[in-house]
Image (cartoon, helix red, strand yellow):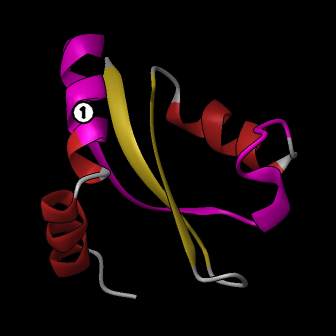
Amino acid sequence: MYYTYVLYSREFNKFYKGQTQDLISRLKQHNSGEGKSTKSFIPWEIVYFEKFNSRIEAVEREKYFKTAAGRRFLKQVVKL
């Protein structure tokens, strides 16, 4: 199983989109400062995720979330 996920840093009002096979471990990595692009905005919380059967599907969805249309979609489904 693969996941596309959206993290949110309340302290910095920042979103991060990614994909992984292990959602909980990946969140722990982000919150321990292991991610170069996320370590400055700790702490992170998962605000949205979707499951996929293949990595290709998860990567494609991650790419979509990074587009203007994807950001509009997330704004509608993620209520903060």
To which quarter of the image does residue 55 belong? top left
Depth order, front residue of 15/3 = 15
Q: Residues within 10 Å of mark 1 (few under 14, many from 20)?
A: some
Amino acid bearing label 1: Lys
Determine the residue positioned at 30% across, 85% down.
79
Residue located 31% across and 38% down the image: 62
Report whether 66 appears left or right of 31.
left
Q: Viewed as shown, does residue 27 lie left or right of 68? A: right
Q: Which residue is mark 1?
A: 51
Compared across the picture, whether 60 is left or right of 32 comes to left
| Residue 47 in the image, given as x and y percentages of width and height | 43, 65
Q: Nearer the viewer, residue 68 or 57?
A: 68
| Magenta residue check for 36 | yes
- Image coordinates for residue 61, horizontal then vertical, percent: 21, 36
Q: Which residues are magenta?
A: 34-63
* x and y percentages locating residue 76 in the rendered image: 16, 79
Give residue 58's position: percent from left, percent from top: 27, 26
The answer to whether residue 72 is above or below residue 7 is below
